Amino acid sequence: MATSIVEVRNLTKRFGNFTAVDNISFDIHEGEILGLLGPNGAGKTTTIHMLLGLITPTSGTIQMFGLDLAKHRETILQQVNFSSTYISMPFSLTVEENLKVIARLYSLQNIQKRVDSIIEKLEMNDIKTRLTRKLSSGQMSRLTLAKALMTEPKVLFLDEPTASLDPDIVNKIKAFLKEYQRNAGLSILYTSHNMREMEEMSNRIIFLQHGHIVAEGTSDQIVQRYGQRDLEEVFLKLAREPKAQ
Amino acid sequence: MNLGRIGGLLSRHLYLYKRSFARMLEIFYWPFLDLVVWGFITMYLKDAGVSLHGAVAFFLGALILWDVLFRAQQGIAVSFLEEMWARNLMNLFASPLTIGEYLAATMTMSILKVTAVGSLMMVFAWTFYSYDMLQIGLSLFPFIVNLVISGWIIGVLTTSIIMRFGQQAEVLAWGMVFLFQPISCVFYPLDVLPPLLQSIAWMVPPAHIFEGMRAVLIDGDLPVAHILWATGLNIFFLVSIVFWFYHTFNVCKDKGMLVRVGE
C-alpha cells in the first residue's frame, strides 16, 4: 500500500454563512499526482490555501509527513512549495534575484549553484537578468515553477499552472513536470480546468463540487461511474448539478 | 528565529532599493527639503530677533529626531506595502518564514533607513547651518533607540490595519505617524498643550524624548526620568503591539484575507 504523504481529514472552511469546503477527507500518496477538479467556486483554491497554512480551517486536520500542519508549520513548509498562474513575484527584481531571495527563505545551501541549476533546467538562461516585470506570462509561469522546484519540495501544490498559456508552453511545462516528478518522486496536488491535461497528468482525481468531494478515483473509473464518454462530459454533468439543500 | 530567512527577506528589499531611483530619492529628497525649509525658518527667527533659546538646535534637532521616528515607522509599513503591491505575501507566508522573522526583517530594514536618512540629515545640518546634532551628547543614543522603537510600534500598528482592511488603508503608511505628531510635542514644549492632551502626551514615548531633548539643550542635563519613562512605555507598547499583530494575522488567516490583501 502506498504511503500517504498528505492526510486531510474532515476539512471544513466556512466564511460566515458560506461553506467553501465541507468536510472533505483525502490522502496524497508518495510519488502520486492527485488531480483536484471542480468548477469555479468549488473550493479547490481554498483547499490549497489551507494546505499551505494561508487560511485557517474551521475544523478538520491536515497532516503532512505524519505531522500536524497547525503545530509544525515551519518543518512542513520547508518541504512543501506551490506554483500558480495567479501568483506573482516582485516585479522590480530580476529573475535571478527573486530566486535567490526564495532560496534564502527556504534556508538552501549553495544558493548560486541551486539557482543556476534550476535556471538551466527550465531553460531560463536568456532571461535570468531580466526584470520580472518584463517577463511574458509564459516566462512568469516558468519563474513561479522554478521558485517552487528549486527548493526540492516533497509535496508540490500546482493551482492551474498552465491557465492562460499558449499550447506550446503548456506542452513544455507538462513534459517538464512529468519528468521531474518521476525523477524526484514528488507528490503533487494539481488543479486545472483542462480535462485532457487532468487526464494526462493525474494518477487519481478528486472532483469537488460546492465544497464536497462528489467523485474520486482514476479518470477511467470516474468516467465509467457516471456513464459519460470522457472526463469533460463528467465535468459538465457534475458542474451543472444544482447544490443539494 | 532563523537569521538566514531574515536576511533573505532583507535582501529582497535591498535589491529593490539598489535598482529603484524613485525609492532612493524618497529616502533622501523629503528629509533634505524638510531640513532646508526648517533651516530657513530658524534663520528667519534668529534674524528677526525672536527670543528663543537655542532656536536652531530646537528646530533642527527636533526635525532630525522626528525623521528618525518617521523613517522607522515607514521601514515597517512601506515594506509591507511593497509585498502587497508585488502580490508577494503568499510567497512569503507559504514559506517557512515565521511572523517573528518577518517583523525582525522589517525592523532591520527600518534601522537601515534611519541610519541612512539620519546620517545624511546630520551632515546636511552641519554643512548648511553649522548645527552639530552630536552636541546633545551621550543622551542622543537612548533618544534615537527609543524613537526607533516608537517608530516600530506605529509601523506594526499601521501594518496590522493595512493587512486587515487592504488597499483602502494603505494611505496610513504615510499618514498614521502624523496622528501622533501633535501629542509628541516635536516642535514645542509639552506644557503648551491643553491639560487633557498633556495627560495623553505623557503616555506617548516620543513626547518624553522630545521633552528630554529640549532639557538637554536648555539645561545640559541628562534627562534620566524622561529616558526611563520613554523606555518603559516603549517596552509595554512594543510587546502589546506584537501580540496585536499576531492576533490580526490569525484573524486574517481565518477570514481568508491574507491571500486577498492587495486585491
Image (tube, coloured by chain):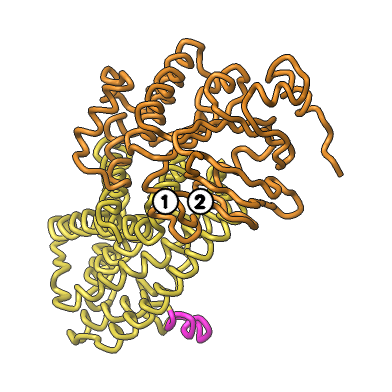
Chain colours: A orange, B yellow
Coordinates of residue A38 in the picture (x, y in percent): 67, 31
> Would residue A116 be found to the left or right of residue A39 on screen?
left
The residue tagged 2 is: A53
Task: Tell me the crowding category of disc 1: few under 14, some 14 to 19, or many 20 or more residues within 10 angstroms, Cα based.
Answer: many
Which span of residues is magenta-colored? B193-203
Question: Which residue reaches farthest front?
Answer: A1
The answer to whether residue A62 shows anywhere in this view is: yes
**In this picture, is B74 found above or below B18?**
below
Residue B183: quadrant of the picture? bottom left
Question: Which residue reaches farthest right?
Answer: A245
**In this picture, is A101 found above or below B124?**
above
Kindly identify which chain the residue marked by label 1 belongs to: A
Tell me, yes or no, whether the highlighted magenta stretch contains residue B129: no
State the SS at label 2.
Answer: loop
Residue type at mark 2? Gly
Residue type at mark 1? Ile
For the residues labelled 2 and 1, the Cα–Cα distance comes to 10 Å
Foreground label between 2 and 1: 1
Name the residue at 61% across, 30% down. Answer: A205
**In this picture, is B228 found above or below A118?**
below
Q: Point out the image quarter for the C terminus of chain B.
A: top right
Image disc number at residue A76: 1
